[in-house]
Image (cartoon, rainbow, N blue to C red):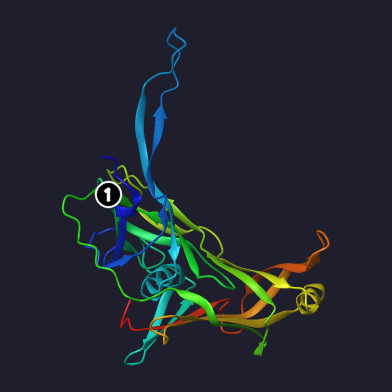
Amino acid sequence: MSNIGALATIGWTKETTFATPLAATRFWRYSSQSIKESIAQLQEVQLRGVLDEPDNFPGIITIGGDISGPAHSDILGDLMLSVFGAKSTSGTGPFVHFFSPQNGALDALRPVPSYTMQISRDLDVLQLAGAVVSKLTLKMAKGGLMTVSASILGQKAIVLGSPAAAVFGTSQPFWYLNAAITRNAVAYADVEEFTVTIENQFDAVPTIDGTQYINRIKWNGMRKVSVSFTADYATTQLYNDFKAQITQPWSIVAKGNNPATDTLTLSFPNILWTDAQPSVSGAGRITVSASGLAKLNASSFAFTASLTNGIATY
């Protein structure tokens, strides 16, 4: 019979040592994944009296792709830890996890905490070791569920003979009900949908180490945090901020459905809007498509996140 995506699963666990695989302990009820292995092709430059290409030789194996799905409270902490790099936890249940971006690397082989991922494709199970999140995107619209997409970069992969059994958490995704957006600590109720993206410039580094895989993952540029809104053109506030090129603190708070104590708070000390102009495309309602960048504040944070849930540690 054909194998189907409905029977596929994804799980992971945080690694102690980079690319030393561990059994998956947390599983995500996800929507799609495109993680794959790519093998560079090496070819001699040779002239040999024929028009056919010479033989190929296998080069470096690189592994990466995207995973996406509903933003469940339990799995979001792992994704945020790997893209931010550090967290602190307080409380005795529910627990409050505070994530902040780091200006450095976790160690010599990885910029942020790495994970072992178990990717079931129904027919087989791929184990990806040394996996980090290079880009994380959160989206939500009024009347919808929050979704999350993560771009993954890994060190090596094998096909597992005995994968860990998938055991899923019970948390529900964050959604629009009881969500709130503020500008300068004042409610801003015109936003219809938002997208937040944190993008780390990571590079897979191959060294001559006797293997076909990359050896380490390193920083290779500046981190970028971007925010976009689609808003009802009820006031000129977004346009005025863009026109004046001033920064203002913004926050986005989302709540879970079950348990209701699950809370996600995204904080931006300074957002600079690079575009926020209304467009008239016909006789209907006018909206504003705003794009902005999160900039550093005095504490050297362009963006922080707070996640409250029943998970004791990540």
Residue type highlighted by circle 1: Asp
Q: Quadrant of the rendered structure where residue 141 is?
A: bottom right
Relative image position of residue 235 (x, y in whole percent): 79, 79
Foreground residue among 61 and 11:
11
Disc 1 crowd, CA 10 A, few/some/many (<14, 14-19, 20+): some
For this view, does 177 lie left or right of residue 168? right
From the image, which quarter does the C terminus lie in?
Answer: bottom left
Q: In this view of the protein, which residue sits in the foreground, 116 or 261?
A: 261
The image position of residue 110, as x and y in percent, is 38, 62
**Residue 272 visible here:** yes
Q: Residue furthest bottom?
A: 92
Q: Is residue 10 above or below residue 180?
A: above
| Image location (x, y in percent) of residue 126 | 28, 50
Residue labelled with disc 1: 122
Left or right: where does residue 224 sit relative to residue 9?
right
Q: Quadrant of residue 272?
A: bottom right
Residue at the spot 36% in from the left edge and 21% down from the top edge: 55
The image shows residue 294, relative to residue 255, as above or below, that is above
Can residue 101 be seen here? The reply is no
Residue at left 36%, top 36%?
A: 59
Q: Residue at x 44, y 8 (%)?
A: 50
Judged from the image, the secondary structure of the residue bearing numbered disc 1 is loop
The quadrant of the rendering that contains the N terminus is top left
Which of 314/228 is in front? 228
